[in-house]
Image: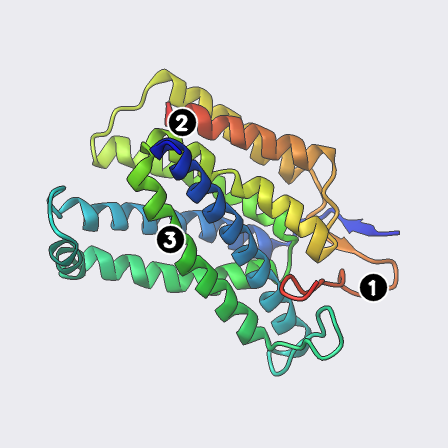
Amino acid sequence: MTPELTGIFILIAAVMVESFAQVFLKIGATCGAADGGRSCRQAGRAGACISARGWVLFGLAAYLVEIALYTAALHFLDLSVAFPLGSLCFVGVAILSKLFLGETVGRIRWLGVGCILAGTVFVAL
Amino acid sequence: MKDVETKLPGAVIVGLIFAVVLDTIIQITWKVAVSGVPRDASLAVATAGVLSSPFFYAAMLAFGAQLWNWLRVLARADLSFAQPFTALSYITVLGLSSRWLHEHVSPSKGVGVSLILAGVFFISRTPFRTNHPDGREPQAVDPIHP
């Protein structure tokens, strides 16, 4: 495997981790709003009840992992490649928001995400 | 069947503006803190160099404020709506880097800025929150135990 390909795989992993970090923060934020942050909102399986603060800590931990992965990816890739690829997290967040948060992600929102992706490519040139 | 909310509350607008401003502060102060470290420095020297910079602590302070602000935004708006707005910090960082750090801004970057602005505009035209008809929030699925 070439160093560039290794860097791209690591960067994609970083993007996925960052996308999940955002989902964890969203769940934590919504739990806090729903019950004053005292307990939690049931999420998923019966018994899988994590406090709002727990979800936020999950999110922060995921961000630390993402920083480590992104730093490792920069070891193999130029910033001009890593920067636009990193913006794929906008796509990841849109997909995960639909899958795990039940959010409505329509065509116009996808169009906006597409424009932002293209824009970051040009900014990196 | 899901319904949507279209009128963006002032608290969300203010939160998104703060998110972009704080993100810009984090990136600029982080860049200034790191730029004082020689490129060929060892990990220990680089870490010590960054930790000795007041800009590093300014970045950490801004990061804490950003987390607090972002959780407030996410409590009121869809993640898939709010998060793309943070792309506006690419533009503010570009402008400040050009002005203060004397970094070159090419014409292609101008095209990129226009596309990012167009993308944010499209997203701002979409409903900011998904609601179910019975008034409850969309039910989250545990991403760890789906």
Count all numbered tags in the image, as a single digit: 3
> What type is the residue that disc 3 sits on?
Ile
Q: In front: B78, or A48? A: A48
Residue B103 occupies quadrant: top left
Task: Let me know if marks 2 and 1 both belong to one chain.
Answer: no
**Percent position (x, y) of residue A81?**
39, 30
Q: Is residue A125 above or below residue A59?
A: above
Q: Earlier in the sequence, mark 3 or mark 2?
A: 3
Which residue in the structure is indicated by mark 3? A67
| Image point (48%, 61%), residue name | B69
Which residue in the structure is indicated by mark 2? A123
Q: In front: B3, or A101? A: A101
**Percent position (x, y) of residue B83?**
55, 47
Left or right of A72, for residue A49: right
How far is mark 3 from mark 2, CA to CA? Answer: 21 Å
Q: Callout 3: helix, strand or loop?
A: helix
Q: Callout 1: helix, strand or loop?
A: loop
Give the foreground label among 1 and 3. 3
| Image point (11%, 43%), residue name | B40
> What type is the residue that disc 1 sits on?
Gly
